[in-house]
């Protein structure tokens, strides 16, 4: 069984002492992982390494939830990875210990709130899209303009003079975009020639 500590230092809190003092109350860590800058492209690289090496029976200690994760969904995703490894999490500041029944119950409550928040945000997003469409605003990518000579290319394809791949290449579109645009203009794929049996 390994005991790991995790510390995050960002632009607002460059002092390691507060978090280190909290972890010192536990002591005897196998290793302490420290992420120093959330603005870096790597993000929480040390946390990723920590989560990747966890094994059954290991325990992760951190000073507080906001030092371990960015938001609730991130926190619950990390907890799931810890659980999948058979390890446990202890958050000292909030007194959350997943080894205890109260800790497990707290996680269930947090998961319920995260689900509630996701549903709420999803409903707000859907309502916003409906309102935008009702006012005549387009949602999503702007429609792709029809390339020059597109109708002639579609006609040649529909009459079987060129293949769909050739037609897409000549129009400068991907195959799926070509077929979709051609269908919107009323062009249909040519009927397949029946092969005569000997």
Image: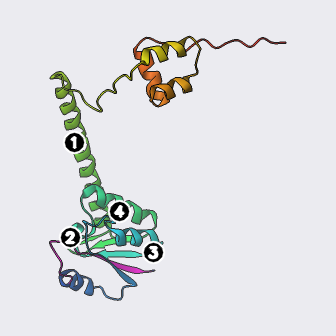
Q: CA distance from mark 1 to mark 4?
A: 21 Å
x%, y% of residue 114?
Answer: 26, 51
Which tag, 2 or 3, sits closer to the chain's start?
3
Element assignment for label 4: helix
Q: Callout 1: 10 Å neighbours few (<14), some, many (20+)?
A: few
Report if the CB atoms under discs 3 and 4 are less than 8 Å apart.
no
Residue 57 bears which disc, if any? 3
Q: CA distance from mark 2 to mark 1?
A: 26 Å
Which tag, 2 or 1, sits closer to the chain's start?
2
x%, y% of residue 6?
Answer: 31, 76
Reply yes or no: does residue 9 show up in magenta. yes
Q: Which residues are magenta?
A: 2-16
Q: CA distance from mark 2 to mark 4?
A: 16 Å
Element assignment for label 1: helix
Residue drawn at (28%, 32%), measured in percent from left and top?
140
Residue 94 bears which disc, if any? 2
Q: CA distance from mark 3 to mark 4?
A: 16 Å
Q: Nearer the viewer, mark 2 or mark 1?
A: 1
Q: Which residue is mark 1?
A: 121
């Amino acid at each position: 069984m390994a005991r790991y500590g995790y510390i995050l230092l960002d632009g607002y809190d460059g002092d390691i002492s507060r978090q280190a003092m909290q972890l010192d109350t536990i002591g005897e860590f196998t290793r302490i992982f420290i992420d120093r800058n959330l603005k870096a492209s790597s993000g929480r690289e040390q946390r990723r390494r920590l989560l990747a090496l966890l094994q059954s029976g290991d325990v992760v200690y951190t000073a507080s939830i906001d030092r371990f994760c960015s938001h609730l969904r991130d926190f619950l995703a990390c907890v799931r990875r810890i659980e999948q490894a058979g390890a446990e999490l202890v958050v000292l500041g909030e007194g959350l210990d997943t080894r205890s029944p109260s800790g497990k119950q707290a996680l269930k409550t947090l998961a319920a709130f995260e689900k509630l928040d996701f549903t709420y945000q999803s409903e707000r997003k859907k309502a916003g899209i409906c309102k935008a469409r009702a006012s005549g605003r387009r949602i999503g990518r702007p429609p792709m303009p029809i390339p020059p000579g597109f109708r002639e290319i579609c006609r040649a394809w529909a009459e079987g003079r060129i293949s769909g791949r050739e037609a897409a290449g000549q129009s400068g579109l991907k195959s799926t975009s070509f077929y979709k645009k051609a269908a919107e203009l009323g062009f249909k794929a040519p009927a397949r020639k029946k092969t005569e049996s000997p």
